[in-house]
Image (spheres, rainbow, N blue to C red):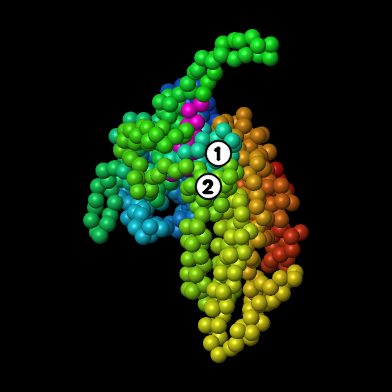
């Protein structure tokens, strides 16, 4: 086979790069063909995960290098960091953010090649227990480079992940944990003892050397990211352990470190074979081998884990083994937050209380979660004076909290309690706002009857817009069609199954987006791909006839699109009715 000259190969690569842009829009952010870019990255991730599953490590590393150096990978990384992330406007030490298309297209070229990770900006955020959690905010360019590493590393972590690990995993959520706990514990023969564990400072104390020796990525890049210094009080402080929280790749590294615990538990506590004599109906005896399960099941969400067992004594041995497993990675269980309980006593996990009542498992909203939500409501009402803004913020908070907890049992008693609590808060807020008016006057001013029910509302005379507060009224939803625990989302053989899988998070969108999502069956009309409801911040509403051209906000004039597809359609590079 005759090799092509270098110049000809370069010309072919230039043609391939040009195919990533729409005609006449080359080298512009508004001209990127995202369908082509996403397909290129998906194909490479599929090959990486297959190579990992078949143990072809050299091929896997070569494919990772190919993805990291590809322009498609850099485009996805810049879009993720500069356009999709919730902290896209949070800069590093340099104060740089990518707010314009020109800066984003320039960043695609700037993150190409090697460079040492710049120092991080250290900030602290409060935790529920009163302490503060440190975050390290990298430069935007370093965040984008981490995002490229994440695209190459995620398929490897997915292929080697524990089957019951649900935190920071694609297409998994806390609802999968809820369903898995019901599957394990809601039977007569289910294990009755629970080890509720919390890994102490998981991100802050992870051993660098273990990550460098075991994470399948380029060592120099990983070391540069792990050893990045941070600036605090105008001092440059070296990083000796842990992964910087605030970085894009930190959750992926945490999963890579904690994966393998399920396999380790199965090896340490295997099923026991017993030799048992049995007799049939004719009275004839026979001998056969039977297996008695150890009843050890692991459910992990990020650094929180649940392990079931037959007895308290068995779980004490399990706890010791888990500490040995974590010790190799520089971690340990937090003794103050780790406990062993009987299922009849119940335990709290991810904001829920899991307990058996007369051999029936019920998962309810925990008292701590209700108290914390009341505190959020109280602070929001206290610190907001504008009625329209208050209703908008309350609706977002209430809707999100209901969506998360609506998979629990006995939610109507909680809804009733919170409706009453919020009514009293709003009455106090309104009377403070109108100190000389009576309670009856205040009620007539801010409450109106809608569909036979009283609701807190406000009409803005400036724009003739009416704001109405929603109430706690979402019905209970059982997760019956969650993703199978052994499904690899990067394997293209599972693509049809994942596309047909209905999202269990019904109603997580706003009142405007939700009927549009149902009408379109969750499919974006531009790229023809599925729009996940739990990623609502990446979904935009498009006006078919723009408002400036006397278009309306009627449902017939609206479409639901991916945010980047909406961006393409607005700049004329991708008509709505054109297939990708």
Determine the residue located farthest toward the right in the rendered image.
Answer: 556
Residue identified by numbered label 2: 354
N-term-proximal mark, 1 vs 2: 1
Residue that carries the numbered disc 1 in the rendered image: 185
Magenta stretch encompasses residue 115:
no
Extreme residue in the front direction: 283
Q: Quadrant of the C terminus?
A: top right
Q: Residue 438 at x, y = what percent?
A: 60, 87
Residue 98 lies, with reference to residue 214, above or below; the image says: below
Neighbor class of circle 1 (other Cα within 10 Å; few <14, some 14-19, many 20+) is many
Q: Nearer the viewer, residue 230 or 448?
A: 448
The answer to whether residue 448 is left or right of residue 217 is right
Label 2: element kind: strand
From which residue to which does the magenta span run? Answer: 293-308
What element does badge 1 sit on?
helix
Relative to 538, is 380 above or below? below
x and y, in percent, of residue 444 in the image: 66, 82
Residue 346 appears in the picture as rendered: yes
Residue 71 placed where, x, y %? 49, 39
Please report the residue visible at 59 percent of the width from the left and 15 percent of the height from the top: 278
Does residue 28 appear in the picture of this structure?
A: no
Other-residue count near label 2 (Cα within 10 Å), few / some / many at <14 / 14–19 / ≥20:
many
- Residue furthest toward the bottom? 436
Left or right: where 488 falls relative to 319: right
Quadrant assignment, res 65: top left
**Residue 114 placement (x, y as % from top left):** 36, 39
Question: Is there CB contact under 8 Å for labels 1 and 2?
Answer: yes
Residue at 51%, 26% (x, y): give it.
Answer: 293
Q: In the rendered view, tell whether residue 454 sits above or below residue 67.
A: below
């Amino acid at each position: 086979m005759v090799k092509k000259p270098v110049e000809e190969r370069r010309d072919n690569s230039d043609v391939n790069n040009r195919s990533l842009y729409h005609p006449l829009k080359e080298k512009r952010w508004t001209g990127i063909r995202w369908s082509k870019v996403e397909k290129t990255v998906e194909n490479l991730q599929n090959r990486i995960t297959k190579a990992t599953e078949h143990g072809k490590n050299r091929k896997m590393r070569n494919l990772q290098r190919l993805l990291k150096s590809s322009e498609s990978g850099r485009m996805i990384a810049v879009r993720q960091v500069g356009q999709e992330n919730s902290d896209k406007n949070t800069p590093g030490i340099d104060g740089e953010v990518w707010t314009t298309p020109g800066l984003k297209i320039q960043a695609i070229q700037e993150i190409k090649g090697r460079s040492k990770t710049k120092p991080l900006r250290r900030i602290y955020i409060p935790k529920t227990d009163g302490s503060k959690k440190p975050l390290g905010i990298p430069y935007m360019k370093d965040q984008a480079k981490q995002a490229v590493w994440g695209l190459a590393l995620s398929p490897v972590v997915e292929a080697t992940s524990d089957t019951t690990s649900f935190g920071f995993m694609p297409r998994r959520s806390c609802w999968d944990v809820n369903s898995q706990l019901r599957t394990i514990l809601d039977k007569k023969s289910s294990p009755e003892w629970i080890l509720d564990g919390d890994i102490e400072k998981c991100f802050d104390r992870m051993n660098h050397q273990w990550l460098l020796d075991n994470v399948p990525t380029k060592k120099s890049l990983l070391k540069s990211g792990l050893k990045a210094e941070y600036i605090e009080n105008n001092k440059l402080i070296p990083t000796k352990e842990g992964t910087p929280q605030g970085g894009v790749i930190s959750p992926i590294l945490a999963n890579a470190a904690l994966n393998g615990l399920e396999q380790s538990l199965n090896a340490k506590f295997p099923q026991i074979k017993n030799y048992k004599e049995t007799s049939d109906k004719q009275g004839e005896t026979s001998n056969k081998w039977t297996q008695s399960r150890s009843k050890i099941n692991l459910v992990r969400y990020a650094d929180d884990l649940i392990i079931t067992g037959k007895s308290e004594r068995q779980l004490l041995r399990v706890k010791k083994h888990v500490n040995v497993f974590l010790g190799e990675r520089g971690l340990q269980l937090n003794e103050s937050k780790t406990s062993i309980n009987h299922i009849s006593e119940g335990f709290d996990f991810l904001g829920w209380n899991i307990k058996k009542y007369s051999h029936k498992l019920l998962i309810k909203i925990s008292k701590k979660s209700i108290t914390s939500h009341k505190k959020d409501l109280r602070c929001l009402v206290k610190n907001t004076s504008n009625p329209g803004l208050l209703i908008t913020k309350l609706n977002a908070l209430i809707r999100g909290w209901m969506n998360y907890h609506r998979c629990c049992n006995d939610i109507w008693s909680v809804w009733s309690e919170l409706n009453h609590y919020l009514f009293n808060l709003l009455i106090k807020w309104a009377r403070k706002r109108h100190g000389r008016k009576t309670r009856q006057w205040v009620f007539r001013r801010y409450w109106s009857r809608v569909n036979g029910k009283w609701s807190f509302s406000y009409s803005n005379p400036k724009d003739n817009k009416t704001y109405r507060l929603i109430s706690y009224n979402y019905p209970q939803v059982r997760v019956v069609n969650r993703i199978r625990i052994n499904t690899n989302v990067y394997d293209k053989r599972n693509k049809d199954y994942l596309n047909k899988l209905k999202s269990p998070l019904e109603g997580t969108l706003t009142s405007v987006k939700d009927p549009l999502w149902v009408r379109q069956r969750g499919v974006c009309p531009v790229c023809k791909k599925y729009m996940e409801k739990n990623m609502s911040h990446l979904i935009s509403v498009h006006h078919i006839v723009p408002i400036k051209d006397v278009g309306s906000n009627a449902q017939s004039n609206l479409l639901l699109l991916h945010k980047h597809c909406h961006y393409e359609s607005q700049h004329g590079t991708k008509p709505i009715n054109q297939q990708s």
